[in-house]
Structures are given as structure tokens and as C-alpha cells.
Amino acid sequence: MLFCTAIVGSSSCDLIDLDQKSQPSIEAYGILAGLFLARNIMQCSVWRSLLRVVWCGWLTLVAAIIPATLAAAAALPCVAPAPDPSNTYDAEHTYAKLHQAYPQIRIASAAVPDSVHKLANLTYVQYGSRCLQLDLYLPVPGHNAANLASPRPLVILVHGGGWRAGFRDEFAPMAVRLAQRGWAAATVSYRLSGEAGYPAAIHDVRAAVRWLRSHASDYQLDGQRFALAGGSAGGQIASLAGVTGHLAGFDPGAASSEVSSAVQAIVNIDGLSDFTSAEARRYEDDPAKHPSSAGAWFGGRYAEQTARWSEASPIQYVRGGMPPILFIGSSQPRFSVGRAEMMARMQALGVASAVLVLPDTPHSFWLFDPWLQATLDATLAFLTQQLPQR
């Protein structure tokens, strides 16, 4: 039997033949080996080779298991959450509430004409079996305004619903009209507060931006001309995701991707800019609501989650070099809280902003004609100026 011993100060090991004639020496050799093995094991070429084999084998095993595990997780079939009967924020329910006071309105059409190509249910991020999806609307070349040159700028539209309701189809009519004018548009779903609280929706929207930019060449999109737009809660989400494009803290995906989730412009349609002001808290922190929409999203009232209420306010992130913002507002002042002060701060830093207030309009005006057309025209005028074709 061969036995390897390591001698102090030696750079090699000796193989000793322990045959039957040398049995009386086995105990001595065992003691000697035990004393010096731990100290000199790395000086023994045989042990070094053995350890290298074990180490490399372990690394190979890990390298094989981890990607396989991740691939298996990513390959899980998508399971949609059960429909929420309380989620009634859509054009039809809103029309039923508004048409008597505004008899001239009509629900804006989401019909897709021949000049627009719709790609539905594109998964942009997956959490286990939960898949978040978007619909992409692209101009069809050769149809009127769709003759604008490729690659095309993109507007990513974020629906409203008090952070706990709503559907991405809310912005389908605007997406269709953007595509008819030669722009690409995407309507995105995100996790509502009943599924995941703040800041999950911001993470989701940033993930959507990254996915679309990473697939820009597939859809002839101009990755340097991306804008975020949204209405109501979606306006606040779009603003916050847009003004924090330089902050990885709002973007968990930044750690594993070199593709940016920043945008070059923002359109805030009747969304809050400051949760912390007394006027905003009068509505959003109303003690009669158990809880309020904002309180449900933040996981507590202002006094309980002060840091979150402040952190989620887009006004906190005004800085030089931030994306320009167009504010489009209704005649309901509660939804414009923080807008004037935010614009003043932006102006002081030389950052472009603009505002359009549509007179005698309810909240959610963008769901209806004739107001959607005015919203679209203002959006395109602002974005064309701020995101000129290169």
C-alpha cells in the first residue's frame, strides 16, 4: 500500500510502500502524517492536484446547476391572477358616472386600423409564474403619417386606477392614434397595490422600458427617444419612474443588465407630483378612508410611512439634466398638487416643462373624445420638440 507523507520544509511528498513486512511502522507513519498533513497539505503536489480536481468539479457543477435552475424558473408557464371584481376602473364604468354631466363625451375607440400593427401580450418581465405583459402598437409603413423614418420614437403608456385598479387597455385609443401619426406606442400592465405595494409598480415600469430598449432593433424603435406617459396614478408612476432614471434603487434589474431603463421625456396626465403637501394629504390621507388608495399602496398613512410618501413624490428628484415634462391637467385642482412648484424648480435649473389644462374637464378625461384628441396633439407637439429626429 502506498502512503504519502509531507516533511516539514519539503516541497514534495514521498510515496512509501507499506507492505505487509512494514506493518509495525504503520502507527508511526500515521502519527507523523497527522502532525504534518494540515500544515503541509498545500505543499504536496498530489494533494494539490486532488484539491484542484475537487474544486474544479464543484465549480463545474455549480456552473451547470445555476443556469439550469434559472432557466427552469424562467420557463414556468405564466399564470394570470384571478380577475378582481372590484377592479372597475375602465372607460365603460367611468362613462356611466360622467355622461350625464358631460353629455357630449363618447368613449374613445380602440379599434386598430390597417395603418397600425398591434403586437399583444408581450411578456416583458416574469416573477416566478407571474408574467407582466405589454401591447405594442407600430405604424405600418406606407400609410399616411406612418411614412416617418425608422427607427421610430416610442411612448410607453401607464394606466391609472389609484394604484390598485385599472387595465392597460385604458390607453389603447391613445396608442392607436400615436401609431397613426408615425410613433410607436406601448401600453403596459404592472403589479397593483393588492398584489405588491410601493415601489413594485416603479420597478415594473422600469423593467418595461429596459425590455423595449433591449428589443429596439426587433421593432425598429429608436432607443434614444423613449418617453413615459401616464394618467392619474399612472401619471405619477410615469413621472417617478422617469425622474429617477439615474437611480438604481428604483430599478432592481440594473444590477444584471447593461441596458438602460431611463427615458428622455415624460408626460404626466393629471397625476400627483407631491404626496407630502397638506393639500395632497387632505385627499390621499383622509382618515375616513380605510385605507385611502395611496395609503394602501404605501402600506400605511402618512404618519406611519412618512419616508415612503416623500420618496414617491416626483418633485423630490428635480435636478439638472432630468427629462423634460409635459403636464396635462383636468379642471380638478386636487390632481395638480405639486405641479406648479415642480415646474418652478425645473425652470430654475434650465429643464424644459410645459402645461396644458383642459377647461371644464373631469378626471379621466383622456378616456373620452373630444378630450383625447387634445391630449394627443399636445403630447406630440411637446415630444416632437423635445425628442427631435436625429
Image: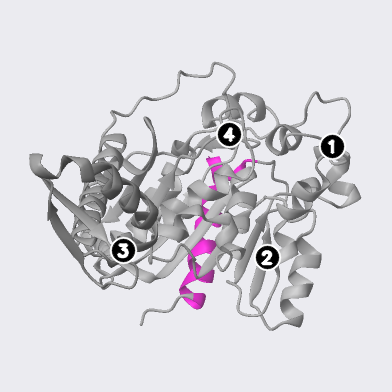
Q: Earlier in the sequence, mark 4 or mark 3?
A: 3
* Residue 277 seen in this snapshot: yes
Name the residue type under label 1: Asp
Q: Residue furthest top?
A: 85
Per the image, the residue denoted by label 2 is 355
Q: Are marks 2 and 4 in contact (CB under 8 Å)?
A: no
Q: Nearer the viewer, mark 1 or mark 2?
A: 1
Which is the main secondary structure of the residues drawn in magenta?
helix
**Residue where numbered disc 1 is placed:** 285
Q: Position of residue 203 (x, y in %)?
A: 53, 49
Q: CA distance from mark 4 to mark 3?
A: 52 Å
> Is the residue 213 above or below the residue 330 in the image?
below
User: For numbered disc 4, what is the local secondary structure?
Assistant: loop
In the picture, the disc for residue 194 is: none
The first of marks 1 and 2 along the sequence is: 1
Q: Residue at x 54, y 30 (%)?
A: 90
The type of residue carrying mark 4 is Ala
Mark 3, residue position: 42
The residue at 31%/59% (across/down) is 41
**Which region of the structure is painted magenta?**
364-386
Within 10 Å of disc 3 (Cα), the crowding (few <14, some 14-19, many 20+) is: some
Q: How is the image coloured?
A: one colour
Q: In front: mark 3 or mark 2?
A: 3
Q: Residues within 10 Å of mark 4 (few under 14, many from 20)?
A: some
Tell me the amino acid under the disc marked 3: Met
